[in-house]
Amino acid sequence: MYDNWEELENSIQNCKLCKLCTTRTNIVFGTGNKNADLMFIGEGPGADEDLQGKPFVGKAGKLMDMAFMGLQINRDEVYIANIVKCRPPANRNPEDDEAEACLNYLRNQVILVKPKIIVLLGSVALKNILGKEYGITSSRGKWVERKNILYMPTWHPAALLRDENKKIEFWKDLKQVKQKLEEIKEV
């Protein structure tokens, strides 16, 4: 584990811990406020993210930005990362060994950010962070607390592009997050 951002970010620059390194254009490390109270974790970069080297900049990211605007969540005040830092081919889900190879980077990011709330975007983030026994359909919208961090599982924004009906649930989940964050800040 690294004690500072510079060492952590340098440690990943030439990462070859899994086969995703052979097809990536850029490592998509994370972005945002490195001291954020609120952190979002997705599954992995897509094509746009791989090209730009930033998480959630494609269609799903634009949808998430719209939700942020509607809820008055400033993207620059949150921290956004993914389970894997390199794009899985054809936007498939990361395989278990790929996720496992990247998890220490993510754990270190969480340690350095020290968020009070983490929003888990989709099944891959949920299962890799809270455990394989969790399912996104049954878990979304329900708070889970671990090691003084509150977790809110919700739909991945890409799922909203495939199923418009999930947008309302996603919105409700993020409203809960915003409300809880305001309560925490008042204490």
Image: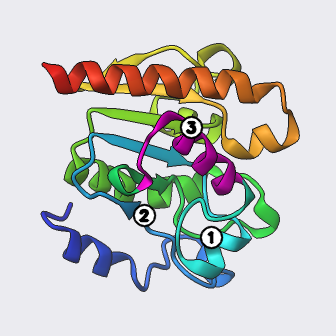
Residue 49 image label: 1
Is residue 132 positioned above or below 124 on the image?
Answer: above
The segment highlighted magenta reads: 60-75
Amino acid on which disc 3 is placed: Gly
* Residue 167, quarter of picture: top right
Residue 95 on image: x %, y %: 67, 53
- The residue wearing badge 2 is 30
Callout 1: few (<14), some (14-19), or many (20+) C-alpha neighbours within 10 Å?
many
Residue 173: % across, % down:
55, 23
Is residue 156 positioned above or below 62 on the image?
Answer: above
**How many callouts does the rendering have?**
3
Q: In what element is the residue under mark 2?
A: loop
Q: Is residue 101 above or below residue 53?
A: above
The amino acid marked with disc number 2 is Gly
Secondary structure mostly taken by the magenta-highlighted segment of the chain? helix
Q: Image check: 125 left or right of 159?
A: left
Q: CA distance from mark 3 to mark 1?
A: 23 Å
* SS state under label 1: helix
Discs 3/1, front: 3
Q: Which amino acid does the dot numbered 1 rest on? A: Glu
Q: Residue at x 21, y 60 (%)?
A: 1
The span from disc 2 to disc 3 (Cα, nearest Å) is: 23 Å
Q: Nearer the viewer, residue 149 or 172?
A: 172
The picture places residue 83, in percent across and down from the top left corner, at 51, 52
Q: Nearer the viewer, mark 2 or mark 3?
A: 3
Q: Earlier in the sequence, mark 2 or mark 1?
A: 2
Which mark is first along the chain, 1 or 3?
1
Q: Label 3: which residue?
A: 70
Question: Residue at point 65% right, 81% down?
Answer: 51
Residue 134 visible somewhere in the drawing: no
Counting from the top left corner in percent of width and height, residue 113 is at 24, 51
* Magenta residue check for 69: yes
